Amino acid sequence: MGRTDILVTGAGGQLGRAVLHCCAELGLQAHGVGTLSMPLDDRAAVLRAIRELAPRAIVHGGAVTNVDGCESESLAAYRINGLGTAWVAEAAAAVGAALAYVSTDFVFDGTAQGVPYATEHPVRPLSVYGASKRLGEEAVLAHGRGDFYVVRTSWVFGPGGKNFPKAILDRARSGQPLKVVTDQVGRPTMTHDLAAALLDLLQLRPAGGGIYHAANEGHASWHQFAVGVLQAAGLGHIEVGSQLAADLKRPAPRPQWSVLDTDRLTRVRGKPLPSWQDAVRRYLELDAVAQPGRGGKQY
């Protein structure tokens, strides 16, 4: 067997599955690892796995992503999102692999109202999750390698698993009332589009490495996102009530404005990601949220 083209961490998650699917479509030899085969809280295991696989490139999407849970399990968040990423970067450098580390809009504080966050904008995470992901960013950037990339994204959804469109549709189809936050605005991002952008970045290898933002075109509040999902699913007649983020009393604060400026990635790829509305339509076509018997294609 030849050298693995792409190693994908967090392979069992929504994004990991999408990256593996895109690799197969592109004819790339990919190998996915999860917490059993490469636990990110174990430096020796991380170094050993990457040394043995010796990939040409790594998409590092494995992380603790329960934003509220990170507040009560902060040590695990910092160890996996921060130290675990540092160990992946260490191992990638040792085998000469390029690295795309998937980070988050939560590194920003949301105060830049109306102006998309540029890649160089100062960071100020509000939550343990955001701070732990920023620690991972710093570990990757500290290597100063021209083929190490930090790729921030936002509001990710995709076929399989838990995500916002699925939650909205499940609730709507069960006849439960809907109330969605109006005072948080961001850019919804579909896993398949994000996966394609990550692989493009690793194949194009723009010089200098550094930070990129990847998200579907357009922005919306969570309320507008919910309405768009229902309309695309033919459920536009269902009323969506409004509420403020503070009403939810969540443990972790979220940025009110987390719209990312994706111009740098667009210039490298020569095209933007599709609109979030188009992404929602394709998501529904994959029937990822369909009940048994609805038919459709599953990934």
Image: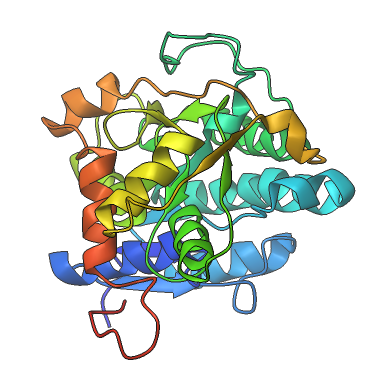
Image coordinates of residue 217 in percent, x first then y, are: 26, 31
Name the residue located 28 percent from the left edge and 21 percent from the top edge. 264
Name the residue located 55 percent from the left edge and 40 percent from the top edge. 241
Image coordinates of residue 233 in percent, x first then y, are: 29, 59
Of all residues shown, which one is farthest toward the bottom? 293
Image coordinates of residue 158 in percent, x first then y, are: 38, 60
Is residue 15 shown above or below 52? above
Count of labels shown?
A: 0
Q: Is residue 2 left or right of residue 47?
A: left
Which quarter shows the C terminus? bottom left
Is residue 240 shown above or below 209? below
Q: Is residue 104 left or right of residue 99?
A: right
Which quarter shows the N terminus? bottom left
Name the residue located 71 percent from the left edge and 65 percent from the top edge. 44
Name the residue located 61 percent from the left edge and 71 percent from the top edge. 38
Most foreground residue, 15 or 84: 15
